[in-house]
Image: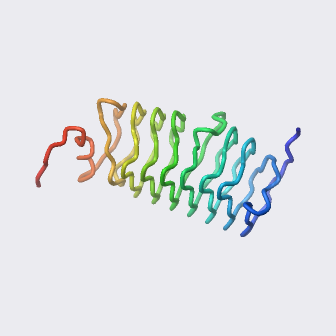
């Protein structure tokens, strides 16, 4: 089945839980205030699209292609990005709520997370080389066998990262949250 090709279209305040979007390849499209909550987006292609103020919580992304897309002020609770097509996978997040999302095993070097909630997010086995986490809360986020070389955590908070179980060479950290690198030792540190 051939996918429809939808270039440069704008979608405003549509509820895709009532009427699903047409399965296709969306290129340079803008989605503003749309509800994709729980929507089946399996096999869709989104290239250079912008999502603003959308709800994508629990959207199903099996084999969906997300290439150079930007998400701003979106609610994306529990999204399993690990199910996406890995070819060309690239995105950025600003002012988003990604609580309990999963990026398990993905190679997403240079990804920019800014002013976003990343609490309970699973980054196990991820390649986040040169990623940035500006003003992001990483409370209970899972970093296990994660590549964090050159990643920037200077403005991030609430993270707990085991340097012995993750690659952190040349990663950037700042006080006071850098102490999260010592959490596994269950020690008390005073000022």
> From what the image shows, is residue 119 above or below residue 33?
above
Question: Residue at coordinates 48% horizontally, 54% vertically from top-left?
Answer: 99
Q: Is residue 41 toward the left or the right of residue 6 in the image?
A: left
Colouring rule applied to residues: rainbow
Which quadrant of the rendered structure holds the N terminus? top right
Residue 45 appears at what percent x and percent y?
74, 44
In this rendered view, identify the residue nearer to me: 32 or 109.
32
In this rendered view, identify the residue nearer to me: 152 or 17.
17
Q: Is residue 10 toward the left or the right of residue 172 in the image?
A: right
Residue 105 appears at what percent x and percent y?
52, 33
Q: Is residue 25 toward the left or the right of residue 189 in the image?
A: right
Which quadrant of the structure image shows residue 3? top right
Residue 158 appears at what percent x and percent y?
32, 53
> From what the image shows, is residue 135 above or below residue 128?
below
In this rendered view, identify the residue nearer to me: 191 or 104.
104
Question: Residue at coordinates 63% horizontally, 34% vertically from top-left?
Answer: 86
> From what the image shows, is residue 59 above or below residue 161?
below
Looking at this view, name the residue that lies furthest to the right: 1
Residue 116 appears at what percent x and percent y?
47, 58
């Amino acid at each position: 089945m051939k996918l429809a090709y939808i270039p440069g279209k704008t979608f405003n305040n549509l509820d895709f839980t009532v009427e699903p979007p047409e399965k296709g390849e969306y290129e340079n499209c803008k989605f503003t205030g749309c509800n994709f909550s729980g929507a089946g987006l399996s096999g869709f292609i989104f290239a250079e699209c912008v999502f603003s103020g959308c709800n994508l919580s629990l959207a199903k992304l099996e084999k969906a292609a997300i290439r150079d897309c930007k998400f701003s002020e979106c609610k994306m609770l529990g999204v399993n990005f690990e199910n996406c097509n890995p070819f060309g996978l690239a995105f950025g997040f600003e002012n988003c709520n990604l609580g309990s999302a999963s990026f398990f095993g993905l190679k997403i070097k240079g990804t920019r997370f800014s002013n976003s909630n990343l609490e309970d997010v699973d980054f196990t086995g991820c390649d986040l080389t040169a990623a940035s986490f500006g003003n992001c809360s990483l409370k209970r986020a899972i970093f296990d066998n994660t590549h964090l070389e050159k990643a920037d955590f200077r403005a991030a908070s609430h993270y707990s990262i085991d340097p012995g179980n993750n690659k952190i060479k040349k990663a950037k950290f700042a006080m006071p949250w850098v102490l999260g690198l010592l959490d596994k030792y269950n020690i008390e540190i005073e000022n």
